[in-house]
Amino acid sequence: METIIFYVFAATSVIGSLVLVSHKNPVASALSLVLTLFSTAVLFILLLAHFIALIQVLVYAGAIMVLFLFTVMFLNLRDESLRFDAVKVPVKLGILSLLLLISGYFIFIGFKKIPPLNTMVISHPEPFGTVEGVGEVLFSDYLLPFELTSVLIVVAILGVVVIAKRRFD
Amino acid sequence: MDSIEALRSTLLIGPELALILTGLIVMVIDALIKGKAKTELFWIALLGLAVSFVLNLERFHQVSSAFAGALSLDEFAAYFNIIFIVGAFLAIVLSKDYIAKMDLRANEYYALLLFSTSGMMILSSAKEFMSLFLGFEIMSISVYILSGFNRRSTRSSEAGIKYLVLGGFASAILLYGIALIYGASGTIFLDEIAKRFDINNPLYLAGTALILVAFIFKIGAFPLHQWVPDIYEGAPMAVTGFMSVGVKAAAFAILLRVLFEGFSQLETSWTQVLWIVSVFTMTIGNLAALTQISIKRMLAYSSIAHAGYILVGVVAAYGEKKLGLSSVLYYLFSYTFMNLGAFGVLTYLSMKGRECETLDDISGLWVKKPLTAVALGIFMLSLAGVPPTIGFFAKYRVFLSGVRAEFYWLVVIGILNSVLSAYYYLRVLVYAYMREEKVEFPSFKPISAVALTILTIGTIILGIFPFYSWDLALKAVDSFLLALQAR
């Protein structure tokens, strides 16, 4: 059962990302990104990483996608500006797939050398990856990173104020 | 970690907290005061930095670790913190008149500079990848915004966007590397990673390589140096000065800590990589600097070249741990004075709404403003490495450690490069001292003048009497190496 679900959603995520890069209409691209993100979220659930799956759907498929669509609509793109040079596409694709093949070969060799998971020293506490598990370590062991995130957000907000404030006041 | 440990740790990170709190205070006061009563919170920002500096000195007496080992508050970090705080302090003092000239929003500027410095300080003491990454991002994002701070200038906005996009890539690569290391070892603490490190597992190799790539981007070394000239040229002058000393020093701090504490088993491999990177960084930086007409762009290429010289020290640490590492620390310390000084003079000479940038903008400086010309001369000679300035002693130590560690070819290439670099530094002086005046120079500004005086005196006095700063570097490296051996 798990294997079937894995293959189905892995396939949809790959299809989604292919449509994303190949489609001419940016709105369609953005929507296919939702498909990819959603399928990846399912894969996270299969890995028992519930928290990441939830965040993936809420933040990426939800909030970030709305932002994407808004930006696309703000830009108000016309058809002509979306058409790209069709002549060079096969050449680019050829170079790209050649590079992918070469790096894929090395990655394949590398993967063979990785020792099987059970021999590697990984010990996870029981609720690892669930909302409960993440919450527990977030407010105890990783208190500092949690607090630092708030500083990072303050910096980001300050940046937005600096950039978006009326130009000359 | 229980609540007592959390409280104890919070009290220990006083220097970082002082900066974050000052940044918040500056933000809040700026938002509360409305209309004409709006003042610049210049002195509050400086006070925060001074408090942080004093609290940081405490770490030279008492080494500790906080948040269950996430931060190592040792002398190594304290030395780097001095570089960041001094750099930020002088950058703020230099910026005050510049902000008025360019009509920028002062308080946000100060707050961002303070946050950025706090990020660097967290970075220099981070021993755990999550805090490390957050420190990295706090520093970087503040600097991205500062680069694009002058919104009237299209070049400044361009620099901000470019830095954001390229820096985002570097952060992503860093994260990918961290993820691979975590996947292989199951931990994000550097000590534990070093214990579990397994050379035969390719995940470690790939992770180390990706993390190294991100750091090479941040220090602006070959082959990821192309962003440096564009962004240094576009960013406001005072910000460029701060970036070139602060961000570079922070990137080197974390490079040393991660490589030596976490990935020391691969030392031979990454030393070889850094050898090649160092040679190309020096050579390409210097060759490109030769042809520049804009002093700002020339200084950007020169900062690439200096990253190459500093990498000689990192490579030399392969054979000569103590001397190599302390020469890196000392170089970054002295670079803060001379490079901030060089950018400081250009900041000082900028006119209302127009930066002092090309060689023509400084021609005839000697006749009109002799003291500024002398300061510029000292900074340029120091950057070129002429004795008795601080730049000479820094270069001497880096190359000496290279010779001791028997990297003769690297040192020869380094010395040839610094001879080459004298040409473009001295050309600035030719324009300043021997040419006719072409543009007007701004009137005397006391606050900027004080900062330039401090930098000039520092460049000379610390050059002739480098003892205290050099001893401090040795002490810092000692504690760093002791901690490495002890585990």
Image (cartoon, coloured by chain):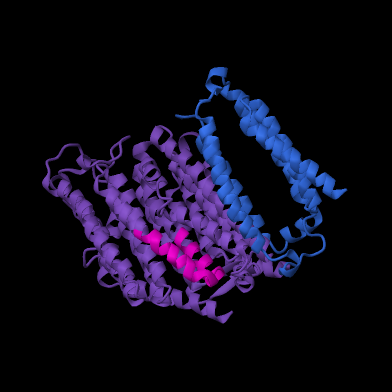
Chain colours: A blue, B purple
Front-most of B465 and B446? B465
Give the tally of numbered discs.
0
Residue at (64% x, 71% y) in the render:
B196
Residue B208 position by quadrant:
bottom right
Q: Position of residue B145 (x, y in %)?
A: 48, 42
Dividing the image into 4 quarters, which one contains the C terminus of chain B?
bottom right
Residue at (22% x, 60% y) in the render:
B419
Question: Where A71 falls versus B90 (above or below)?
Answer: above
Question: Where A62 falls versus B114 (above or below)?
Answer: above
Front-most of A167 and B424? B424
Question: Would residue B335 appear left or right of B437 to someone viewing this image?
Answer: right
Whether residue B309 can be seen here: yes
Q: Position of residue B112 (x, y in %)?
A: 49, 47
Residue at (64% x, 56% y) in the render:
A147
Question: Would residue A76 appear left or right of B107 to someone viewing this image?
Answer: right
Q: Position of residue B277 (x, y in %)?
A: 40, 59
Dividing the image into 4 quarters, which one contains the N terminus of chain B?
bottom right
Q: Is residue B133 magenta?
A: no
Question: Would residue B5 appear left or right of B103 to someone viewing this image?
Answer: right
Residue at (61% x, 26% y) in the render:
A72
Which residue ends up furthest to the right in the rendered image?
A: A1
Q: Position of residue B118 (x, y in %)?
A: 52, 57
Q: Is residue B260 magenta?
A: yes
Q: Which residues are magenta?
A: B251-279
Magenta span: chief secondary structure: helix
Question: Where A59 falls versus B62 (above or below)?
Answer: above
Question: Would residue A89 appear left or right of B316 to someone viewing this image?
Answer: right
Whether residue A61 can be seen here: no
